[in-house]
Amino acid sequence: MEQHNNTDHDSSLKSFIVLSRAYHAVEEKIREDIRTYGLNPTEFAVLELLYHKGEQPIQQIGKKILLASGSITYVVDKLEGKKLLQRVRCPKDRRVIYADITNGGEKLMDEIFPKHQATIQDIFGELSKNEQKTLIILLKRLGLSLKYS
């Protein structure tokens, strides 16, 4: 059986490996940052959504932050226990329950979101603004090409 050495790697495979490693390194830095605020990444994602977009139907949160619906109830329960969000029944349809950020949740996000944003800026500060724009264009093109294939 013929062995292939590393120089035989196709640039597509190399691109995939580099993208995967970079994604995991960035994700780990982001997770570390979020942990310093006493939250896990899912809790942070839910709070960030409510902070920026306002109250959301609990059933819709999972789709917006890419999380299984069963996990959302657990996360909402935890955040409600920490008094960072509250459940609010829809007055027009009592079956619909919204999650809404509390004043305490808003204060927390006022404090931590700018720090979190600065961490992300530090991570991507390795790239120039033009390189960041190019990266966005290339990743969008790659993602969109798969969405419709």
Image: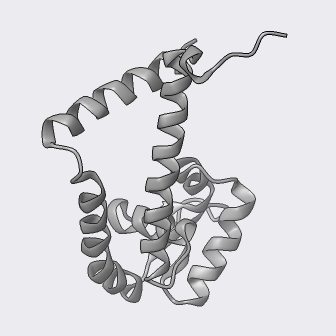
Near-viewer residue (79 or 8):
8
Visible residue check, residue 55? no
Residue at 37%, 27% (x, y): give it.
140
Residue 57 horizontal/vertical position (percent): 55, 59
Residue 65 horizontal/vertical position (percent): 53, 53
Residue at 42%, 61% (x, y): give it.
49
Compared to residue 19, the image places residue 9 above or below, namely: above
Compared to residue 95, the image places residue 7 above or below, namely: above
In the drawing, does residue 117 fall left or right of residue 15? left
Visible residue check, residue 19? yes
Near-viewer residue (26 or 79):
26
Residue at 70%, 72% (x, y): give it.
74
The colour scheme is one colour
**Where does the C terminus fall, quadrant-wise?**
top right
Residue at 30%, 57% (x, y): give it.
123
**Where does the N terminus fall, quadrant-wise?**
top right
Residue 26 horizontal/vertical position (percent): 43, 54
Q: Place residue 110 in its image quadrant.
A: bottom left
